[in-house]
Amino acid sequence: MIASVDEHYMGLALRQAKQAELSGEVPVGAIVVNEVGEVIGEGFNQTITTHDPTAHAEVVALRNAALTLQNYRLTGASLYVTLEPCAMCMGAIMHARIKRVVFGARDAKTGVCGSVIDLPAEPRLNHHAEVIGGIMSQICGETLTDFFQRKRQKN
């Protein structure tokens, strides 16, 4: 069976999540893809190692993509992330003018693409990204669940 394009890119985001885990970070990964399918930015959680509360996978990937393009506007690009974005990340996504957000696992505690609130659907905001959730949700969710389970066992 041939994986969908979204599954291919989510697989790349999962590789970034593995990098986060190897660094001792919560395993969340993200990539930014331009209109022709080229990966122009990638990132994984780095809040602990960089002592930076804004260093979520999405923000790191957006920063990378903006440097690649030498433009903070990422119009037409898609962002793939293994976990539903939080409010901070969704704000950055909207400011970057990302066209499409594809995420894996839902986040019942801080997710703002329908779990806690639905920020992209807020009509008063000036930019609205298309959002697709649940791509490879089982493996994305298990990556996080397994990580936290191992962490609890160590403690």
Image (spheres, rainbow, N blue to C red):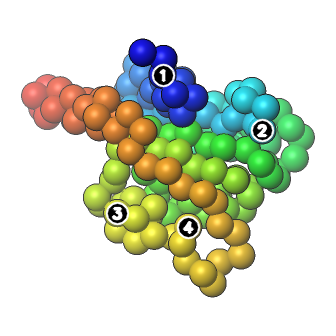
Of badges 3 and 1, nearer the viewer stands 1
* C-alpha distance separating marks 3 and 1: 26 Å
Q: Amino acid at mark 3?
A: Ser
Q: Amino acid at mark 4?
A: Pro
- Label 1 packing within 10 angstroms: few (<14), some (14-19), many (20+): few
The residue mark sitting in front, 3 or 2, is 2
Q: Nearer the viewer, mark 4 or mark 1?
A: 1
Q: CA distance from mark 2 to mark 1?
A: 19 Å
Question: Residue 155 at x, y = what percent?
Answer: 12, 32
Q: Quadrant of residue 118?
A: bottom left
Label 3 with label 2: CB-CB less than 8 Å: no
**Tag 3 residue:** 115
| Residue that label 4 marks | 120
Tag 3–tag 1 contact (CB < 8 Å): no
Task: Please tell me whether mark 4 or mark 2 is closer to you in this view.
Answer: 2
Is the Cβ of the residue at disc 4 closer than 8 Å to that at disc 1? Answer: no
Tell which circle, 4 or 3, labels the residue nearer the N-terminal end. 3
* The N terminus, quarter of image: top left
Viewer-proximal residue among 129 and 88: 129
- Are the residues tagged 4 and 2 within 8 Å (C-beta)? no
Choose the circle earlier in sequence order: 3 or 2.
2
Q: Which residue is labeled 1 in the image?
A: 3
Q: Position of residue 30 (x, y in %)?
A: 55, 36
Q: Is residue 2 visible?
A: yes
Coordinates of residue 102 in the picture (x, y in percent): 53, 45
Q: Residue at x 77, y 48 (%)?
A: 76
- Dot label at residue 35: 2
- Rounded to the nearest angstrom, the CA distance separating label 3 from label 2 is 28 Å
Which secondary structure lies at badge 4? Answer: helix
State the SS at label 2: loop
